[in-house]
Image (cartoon, helix red, strand yellow):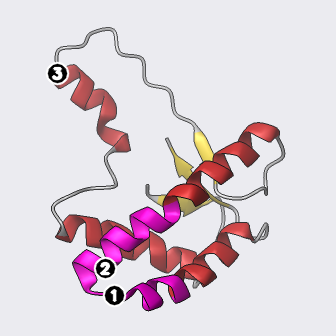
Amino acid sequence: MPIISIDDTMEGTALQKWTTIIPQGAAKLGQSVLNSKNYAKYMKAAGFVDIIEENFYWPLNTWPKGDIEKLLLVWFQKDLNGMSTAALSRAFGWSVKQIDEFLVDVVKDIKDRRIHSYVGV
């Protein structure tokens, strides 16, 4: 997290709403899903030295070509329901039905190759 797009193809989508509401819900629960950008800093604070930070892009659908990208997509989709259910039900009081209905559109957006979204890791 955060999920972003290389262009404006994510604007106005359920996926864009998801990328806003999930971090808000996690924060409301005292957690953060936006920590990956701080991992090198955390490692240094813990006493590690000679830290090498490499940045990668984890696409959320098959818009880029390659088997690795497709595997990463499967991993993300497996985690989507659990992360969403925890944040939306506990932080905002959404029902399982509300969450499931919302995720239908989020999953459609994730699978839509016209939406060029990714997570920087």
Q: Assign a secondary structure to mark 1.
A: loop
Q: Assign a secondary structure to mark 3.
A: loop
Q: Which residue is mark 3?
A: 46
* Image-based side of 61 in relation to 66, left or right: left
Q: Nearer the viewer, mark 3 or mark 2?
A: 2
Q: Who is closer to the viewer here, 20 or 75? A: 75
Residue 94's disc is 1
Of all residues, the one furthest to the top in this rendering is 50
Q: Amino acid type of disc 2? A: Ser
Q: Amino acid type of disc 3? A: Ala
Would residue 34 be seen by someone viewing this image from the given angle? yes
By secondary structure, the bulk of the magenta-drawn segment is best described as helix
Q: Determine the image quadrant of residue 61.
A: bottom right
Q: Who is closer to the viewer here, 25 or 10? A: 25
Q: Who's the residue at 79% across and 57% down the image?
A: 63
Q: Who's the residue at 39% across and 72% down the image?
A: 85
Q: Who is closer to the viewer here, 69 or 54? A: 69
Q: Assign a secondary structure to mark 2.
A: helix
Q: Is residue 87 magenta?
A: yes
The quadrant of the image that shows the N terminus is: bottom left
Give the mark nearer the N terminus: 1 vs 2. Answer: 2
Give the mark nearer the N terminus: 3 vs 2. Answer: 3
Q: Which residues are magenta?
A: 80-101
Q: Determine the image quadrant of residue 4.
A: bottom right
Residue 70's disc is none
Q: How far is disc 3 from disc 2 in space, using C-alphas?
A: 34 Å
Q: Residue 3's x, y, as percent?
A: 51, 60
Q: Determine the image quadrant of residue 50.
A: top left
Q: Residue 88's x, y, as percent?
A: 34, 78
Residue 89's disc is 2
